[in-house]
Image (tube, rainbow, N blue to C red):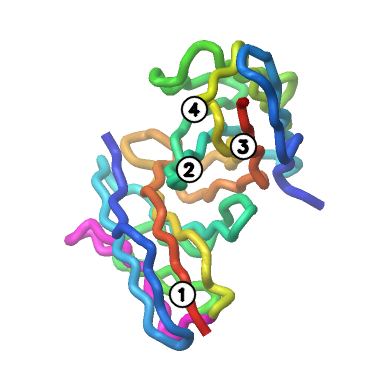
C-alpha cells in the first residue's frame, strides 16, 4: 500500500495551459507539503498545509495554488504554465511532532514545451 | 533562517571504500536532524535520524552523529556498495517552532564496481 501517492508521474504540456497534480496520503498525517526539485536536485518548499494553516513560500508565483478537499489530499494547481515551471514536483506528508520525518511521493516530472 | 550545507558532489568511490558526506546546519534552538536518500526516478526516503545532541542514527550500515558543538551531522559508511549509488540529502526540522523540513542541496554518490 503506497503511503503517499501522486498522479500523474509524468506530465508534458504546452506553455499557457493549466494543469493539476494530485496527491493522496493514507498515513493519517495532519501536515502535507509540496516541494519543487530543480535539475540540480535542489528541493525548494512551495507550500505547507495542515487542517488549520496554509504556509506559502513567498517566492512561489501566485499561478501555483494548493487545494485540499480533505485531510488526506493536497492537490497542486498551476495556471498559465511557463517553461521555467519544468521540474519534478514532490508531495510529502508528516505527522505532528518535532521528531517526525517526512514521507515523500514518487514525484511528478512536469515538462512544459 | 534555517539552512543546511552539504559537500558538493558527485562523490565517486570504488566498491568497499569508506564514505563520508559532510553536513553542517544553522538553526534556532534544537532541531531534529535527518538523512534522506533518493534513488534514480524515486522520491526521497528516510535513511536515518537523530533528535538530540550526541544521538547517533544508523541504518543499513550508514551512521551519523548529532554534534551540537560543531553543528554537524556527517554521514558515514564503512564499506559502500554499488547499490548505494544515489543522491543523499541532509535535512532538519523543528527549529524555532517551524516543522517545515529544510533540506541541503543533496550530494550525489556514485559507486563503481
Q: Is residue A102 left or right of residue B78?
A: right
The picture places residue B40, in percent across and down from the top left corner, at 60, 58
- B109 over A52 or under it: above or below: below
Q: Is residue A46 found inside the magenta-colored segment of the image? A: no
Check disc 4: other Cα within 10 Å, few if <14, some if 14-19, many if 20+. Answer: many
Residue located farthest toward the front when viewing the structure as drawn: A113
- Taking the spot 30% from the left edge, 67% from the top edge, the residue there is B54
Q: Which residue is mark 4?
A: A46
Residue positioned most to the bottom: B16
Number of marks drawn: 4
Tell me the residue that label 3 is attached to.
A91
Circle 1 SS class? strand
As measured in the structure, the alpha-carbon distance from the residue carrying label 1 to the one carrying label 3 is 26 Å
What distance separates the C-alpha of mark 4 from that of mark 3?
A: 10 Å
Residue A25 locus on image (x, y percent): 72, 39
Binning the other alpha carbons within 10 Å of mark 1 as few (below 14), some (14 to 19) or many (20 upward) gives some
Q: CA distance from mark 4 to mark 2?
A: 16 Å
The residue indicated by pointer 1 is: B62
- Figure quadrant of residue B108: bottom left
Choose the circle earlier in sequence order: 4 or 3: 4
Q: Secondary structure at mark 4?
A: strand
Magenta stretch holds residue B71: yes
In the picture, the disc for residue A39 is 2
Left or right: where A62 falls relative to B93 = right
Amino acid at each position: 500500500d503506497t503511503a503517499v501517492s501522486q498522479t500523474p508521474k509524468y506530465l508534458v504540456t504546452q506553455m499557457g495551459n493549466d494543469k493539476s497534480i494530485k496527491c493522496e496520503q493514507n498515513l493519517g498525517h495532519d501536515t502535507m507539503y509540496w516541494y519543487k526539485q530543480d535539475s540540480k536536485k535542489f528541493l525548494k518548499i512551495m507550500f505547507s498545509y495542515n487542517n488549520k494553516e496554509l504556509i506559502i513560500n513567498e517566492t512561489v508565483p501566485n499561478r501555483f495554488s494548493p487545494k485540499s478537499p480533505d485531510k488526506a489530499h493536497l492537490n497542486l494547481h498551476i495556471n498559465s504554465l511557463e517553461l521555467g515551471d519544468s521540474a519534478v514536483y514532490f508531495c510529502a506528508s508528516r505527522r505532528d511532532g518535532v521528531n517526525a520525518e517526512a514521507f515523500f511521493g514518487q514525484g511528478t516530472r512536469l515538462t512544459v514545451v | 533562517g534555517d539552512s543546511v550545507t552539504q559537500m558538493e558532489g558527485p562523490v565517486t568511490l570504488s566498491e568497499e571504500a569508506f564514505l563520508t558526506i559532510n553536513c553542517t546546519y544553522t538553526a534556532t534552538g534544537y532541531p531534529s536532524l535527518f538523512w534522506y536518500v533518493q534513488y534514480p526516478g524515486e522520491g526521497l526516503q528516510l535513511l536515518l535520524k537523530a533528535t538530540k545532541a550526541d544521538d547517533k542514527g544508523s541504518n543499513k550500515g550508514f551512521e551519523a552523529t548529532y554534534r551540537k558543538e560543531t553543528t554537524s551531522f556527517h554521514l558515514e559508511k564503512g564499506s559502500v556498495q554499488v547499490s548505494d549509488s544515489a543522491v543523499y540529502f541532509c535535512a532538519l526540522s523543528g527549529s524555532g517552532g517551524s516543522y517545515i523540513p529544510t533540506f541541503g542541496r543533496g550530494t550525489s554518490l556514485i559507486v563503481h564496481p
